[in-house]
Image (tube, rainbow, N blue to C red):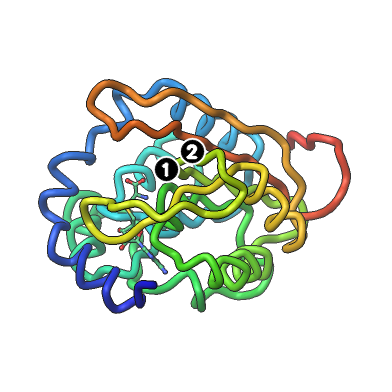
Amino acid sequence: MIEQSDTKAAYDAVAGLYAELFGDVLKTLPMERGVLAAFAEMTDGPVADLGCGPGHLTAHLAGLGLDAFGVDLSPEMVALARKAHPDLRFDVGTMTALDIEDGALGGILSSYSLIHTPPDDLPVVFAEFERVLRQGGHLVLGFFAGDDPEPEPFDHKVTLAYRWSPDTLVVLLRHAGFTEIARMRREPHEDERPFQHVHLLVRKGCGDTVQIP
Ligand SMILES: C[S@@+](CC[C@H](N)C(=O)[O-])C[C@H]1O[C@@H](n2cnc3c(N)ncnc32)[C@H](O)[C@@H]1O
């Protein structure tokens, strides 16, 4: 089990390298760009990129016309994000206790930011996502897929991380008040660790209809 303070220290230590390696990564990820484009089309109102790292995805969402801001546990990441994107807002904060009003957001992006969350804490984070999203608001969750129904720990280069079965996460999300709309699962690229990548798109509220504003 890892503490949030460990995750924060680990990302503070690698923030510069992470920004160098991944700041432009979206250029090589057409499937992920597709998911974010759909998310942008279906979403209005403020959007939070939670666990935003150096802010590259926040900037991408802003480029798609969204009123996007970023939040990250690591002050070093937030400092780099502010430097790279001075026109955007970035705050230091944690997904387990967001400094955001109830129902204030139209959308949330959590891209690989829950991978280090201890499995027992995940319901706390999903409850926070549900609290800050307005009814019908959308959440995109990016993570490494596992086939085991239980979360599978692995030795991520930065700090301990978990792979999740998409079905298990959908059940947890359903308990938190979300409905699945779509999922994208792709094979790893040659230079990536040998895990499939999944993006889930879910909506706050029950029902099966997809609402596009
Ligand atoms: C693998 S990086 C992903 C960064 C970016 N979202 C991306 O897709 O490239 C994980 C990020 O999540 C942040 N993070 C981890 N736990 C967090 C928490 N509880 N609250 C906010 N940010 C968190 C880390 O500091 C780190 O910047």
Helix, strand or loop at mark 2: loop
Image location of residue 73, percent across then percent down: 33, 70
On screen, residue 43 versus residue 162, left or right, reads: right
| Residue 65 numbered tag | 2
Image location of residue 212, percent across then percent down: 74, 34
Q: Residue at x 37, y 56 (%)?
A: 161
Front in this rendered view, residue 101 or 158: 158
The answer to which quarter of the image holds residue 51 is bottom left
Q: Residue at x 13, y 64 (%)?
A: 13
Front in this rendered view, residue 31 or 198: 198
* Crowd around label 1: few <14 · some 14–19 · many ≥20 (10 Å): some
On screen, residue 67 versus residue 42, left or right, reads: left
Whether pointer 1 and pointer 2 mark residues with C-beta atoms closer than 8 Å, the reply is yes
Image location of residue 183, percent across then percent down: 62, 33
Image location of residue 123, percent across then percent down: 62, 68
Query: Looking at the image, is 33 positioned above or below residue 7?
Result: above
Label 1 sits on what residue type?
Ala
Label 2 sits on what residue type?
Gly
On screen, residue 213 versus residue 155, left or right, reads: right
Front in this rendered view, residue 193 or 212: 193
| Residue 62 numbered tag | 1
The answer to which quarter of the image holds residue 193 is top left
Query: Distance between the Cα atoms at labels 1 and 2?
Result: 5 Å
Q: How many marks?
A: 2
On-image quarter of the N terminus: bottom left
Q: Residue at x 44, y 27 (%)?
A: 33
